[in-house]
Image: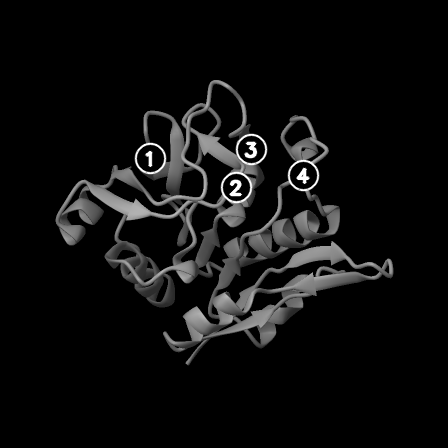
């Protein structure tokens, strides 16, 4: 069995109390693949202590927006931002990389990784960005290993996001391996770490071949790309 630390959403309820939230779809999806998720509270001063019991990897989950203040962007009224979550995930990512742990980042998680390494984000509602909301679409694979393994240069993925990494805003330390259209980065990795992120949600659909490779690579810390 593989024990993985994972991040959570951070919300204030109707009584003014903060709550950490992890969708059951993550737990169900990964448990079916013999991966146990250990949720990390956003209220901990040293969240990396969880690695003492869940030291096989780190999962950065989706949901809500990364604070634009972290990359010099504008915070819109509709954004749901948690400074505590951003701080927790950055701390977890820093300590996971120091320990050479495998890291998988999903949707917002990919954006967190990009911002952590000095990149930025774009708002998909901007006129210059075209991206299909809430529908499946194809991405172009940029890694020869993935193309050979999947038997084609494209893969179909879902879409549930308002912010995005573009080819113009991707951090210089990271390499895209999946792109939608001519600008939106849907998959990226770090060439010197066991780290990969995808903009789509593998846990929300029936498993596709690219998702199977993604999870197997994460569990074995042996990436197909890079």
What label sits on residue 111 in the rendered view? 2
What is the C-alpha distance between the residues marked 1 and 3?
20 Å
Q: Disc 3 and disc 2: Cα gap in Å?
A: 11 Å
Under tag 2, what secondary structure? helix
Task: Look at mark 1 in the image and give the residue it sits on.
Answer: 179
SS at circle 1: strand
C-alpha gap between disc 3 and disc 4: 21 Å
| In this rendering, position of residue 183 left or right of residue 153 | right
Residue 138 lies, with reference to residue 170, above or below; the image says below
Q: Position of residue 107 (x, y in %)?
A: 48, 48
Quadrant where the N terminus is found in the figure: bottom left
Vertical arrangement, residue 160 with respect to residue 185, above or below: below
Q: Is 21 on the left-hand or right-hand side of 126?
A: right
Give the foreground label among 3 and 2: 2
Q: Nearer the viewer, mark 4 or mark 2?
A: 4
Q: x, y percentage for residue 182?
A: 33, 25
Residue 171 seen in the figure: no
- Asked if residue 163 is positioned above or below residue 226 in the image, the reply reads above
The label on residue 52 is none
Of the image marks 4 and 2, the number of the one nearer the N terminus: 4
Q: Secondary structure at mark 4?
A: loop
Q: Position of residue 95 (x, y in %)?
A: 58, 57
Residue position for label 3: 118
Q: Report which residue position mark 4 lands on.
A: 79
Q: Earlier in the sequence, mark 2 or mark 1?
A: 2
| Location of the C terminus (image quadrant) | top left
């Amino acid at each position: 069995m593989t024990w993985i630390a994972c991040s959570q959403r951070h919300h204030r309820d109707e009584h003014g109390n903060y709550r950490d939230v992890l969708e059951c779809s993550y737990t169900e999806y990964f448990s079916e693949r013999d991966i146990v998720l250990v949720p990390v509270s956003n209220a901990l001063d040293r969240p990396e202590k969880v690695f003492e019991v869940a030291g096989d990897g780190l999962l950065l989950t989706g949901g809500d927006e990364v604070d634009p203040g972290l990359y010099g962007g504008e915070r819109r009224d509709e954004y749901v931002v948690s400074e505590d979550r951003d701080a927790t995930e950055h701390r977890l990512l820093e300590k996971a990389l120091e320990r050479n742990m495998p890291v998988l980042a999903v949707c917002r998680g990919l954006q967190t990784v990009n911002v952590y390494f000095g990149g930025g984000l774009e708002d998909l509602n901007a006129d210059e960005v075209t991206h299909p909301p809430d529908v499946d679409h194809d991405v172009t694979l940029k890694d020869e290993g993935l193309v050979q393994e999947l038997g084609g240069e494209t893969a179909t993925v879902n879409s549930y996001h308002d912010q995005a990494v573009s080819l113009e805003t991707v951090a210089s330390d990271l390499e895209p391996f999946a792109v939608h259209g001519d600008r939106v980065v849907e998959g990226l990795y770090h060439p010197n770490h066991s780290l990969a992120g995808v903009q789509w949600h593998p846990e929300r659909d029936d498993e596709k071949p690219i998702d199977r490779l993604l999870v197997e690579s994460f569990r074995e810390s042996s990436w197909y790309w890079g």
